Image: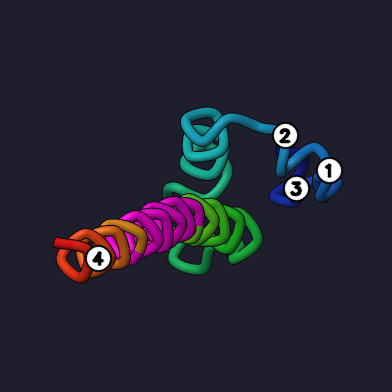
Amino acid sequence: MQGGTHVAMPIKDLRAMPDDRLIAQHDEWFGGMTETSTTMRTELARRDQERQTNVMLRMTKWIAAMTVRMTVATIVNVVLFALS
């Protein structure tokens, strides 16, 4: 902090910074202020959203794979039943 101002951090550096360091930097720069920079909070929210999106995507892929397996099992069941 220089004279109450903060040097803007490039977005590339902000995104590369680990969550815990980003939180610590935010608290150091803006902890005692009533008005805080939304850039760091927005970046944390974006990261949270990205993690949630990745989890949902994995779940969706898992559900799709299970649906295919169940469909194949049902078809095999119907064919075996028809042949017996």
The percent position of residue 68, horizontal first and vertical second, equals 40, 61
Give the distance between the C-alpha atoms of the residues marked 2 and 4, in whole angstroms: 48 Å
Task: Check if residue 61 falls in the magenta segment.
Answer: yes
The residue where tag 3 is placed is 6
Tell me the mark number nearer the camera, choosing from 1 and 3.
1
The residue where tag 4 is placed is 74
Residue type highlighted by circle 4: Thr
Element type at mark 4: helix
Pointer 2 local density, CA inside 10 Å: few below 14, some 14–19, many at least 20: few
The residue where tag 2 is placed is 16
Tell me the mark number nearer the camera, choosing from 3 and 4.
4
Residue sitting nearer the eye, 43 or 38: 43
Residue sitting nearer the eye, 82 or 31: 82
Residue type highlighted by circle 1: Lys
CB under 8 Å between discs 3 and 4: no
The residue at 48%/39% (across/down) is 23
Give the distance between the C-alpha atoms of the residues marked 4 and 1, in whole angstroms: 50 Å
CB under 8 Å between discs 2 and 1: yes
Q: Which mark is residue 35?
A: none
